[in-house]
Image: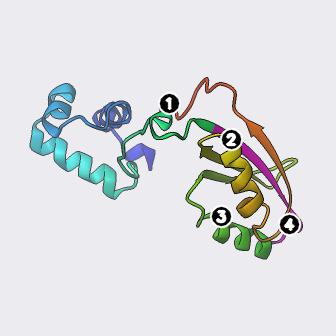
Amino acid sequence: MAARLDRIDLKILRLLQNNGRLSNAELAETVAISPATCHRRTQRLFEDGFIATVRAMIAPKKLAKGTLVMVGVVLDRSTPESFATFEKAIAKLKFVLDCHLVAGDFDYFLKIRVGDMEDFNRIHGEQLIALPGVRQTRTFFVMKEVVDNAPLEF
């Protein structure tokens, strides 16, 4: 699919990845094409799935969600059914920002934002360990966010 992208498409993707608020006119001027052509190309990038969505990056501390927690989860069984059941349940939890099936010591890694350690302790005790199939969790409180949600290099 990437072979269908020319240098202008790639430039549009890079620019929008760095600043999703660029207007079509600004984008067209920067890549040196007409606004109509730019609009058609951008729409095609959405339709073909190269751009999944556009959304604002909210400052977590401003909304009292400044504590980032990574949680490793081990399930009691490694079967397609237990994975599917867990994934269906975890997708309903709004405080979970990311959930990834991983290889290694854990089955899943979760990225969670909370207000503070007390907030996480409540969530952990009431919701995380009650998820179907959870045998063990291991919690990592992030002390410093060095790189977070960096732009994709291409």
Q: Nearer the viewer, residue 141 or 48?
A: 141
Q: Which badge, 4 or 3, is on the more N-terminal residue?
A: 4
Question: For the residue marked with disc 3, what is the amino acid?
Answer: Ile
Give me the C-alpha separation between circle 3 and circle 2: 15 Å
Q: Which badge, 1 or 4, is on the more N-terminal residue?
A: 4
Residue shown at the point (65%, 24%) measured from the top left:
144
Q: Which badge, 1 or 3, is on the more N-terminal residue?
A: 3
Task: Please report contact status of discs 1 and 4: CB closer than 8 Å, yes or no.
Answer: no
Q: Which badge, 4 or 2, is on the more N-terminal residue?
A: 2
Task: Please report contact status of discs 4 and 2: CB closer than 8 Å, yes or no.
Answer: no
Q: Which mark is residue 78?
A: 4
The answer to which image quadrant residue 124 occupies is bottom right
Give me the C-alpha separation between circle 1 and circle 3: 29 Å
Residue shown at the point (60%, 44%) measured from the top left:
113
Residue 13 horizontal/vertical position (percent): 35, 37
Q: Which mark is residue 153?
A: 1
Q: Mark 1, mark 3: which one is toward the viewer?
A: 3
Task: Please report contact status of discs 3 and 2: CB closer than 8 Å, yes or no.
Answer: no
Q: Which badge, 3 or 2, is on the more N-terminal residue?
A: 2
Q: Which mark is residue 90?
A: 3
Q: Mark 1, mark 4: which one is toward the viewer?
A: 4
Highlighted range, magenta: 68-79
Q: Which mark is residue 69?
A: 2
Question: For the residue marked with disc 1, what is the amino acid?
Answer: Glu
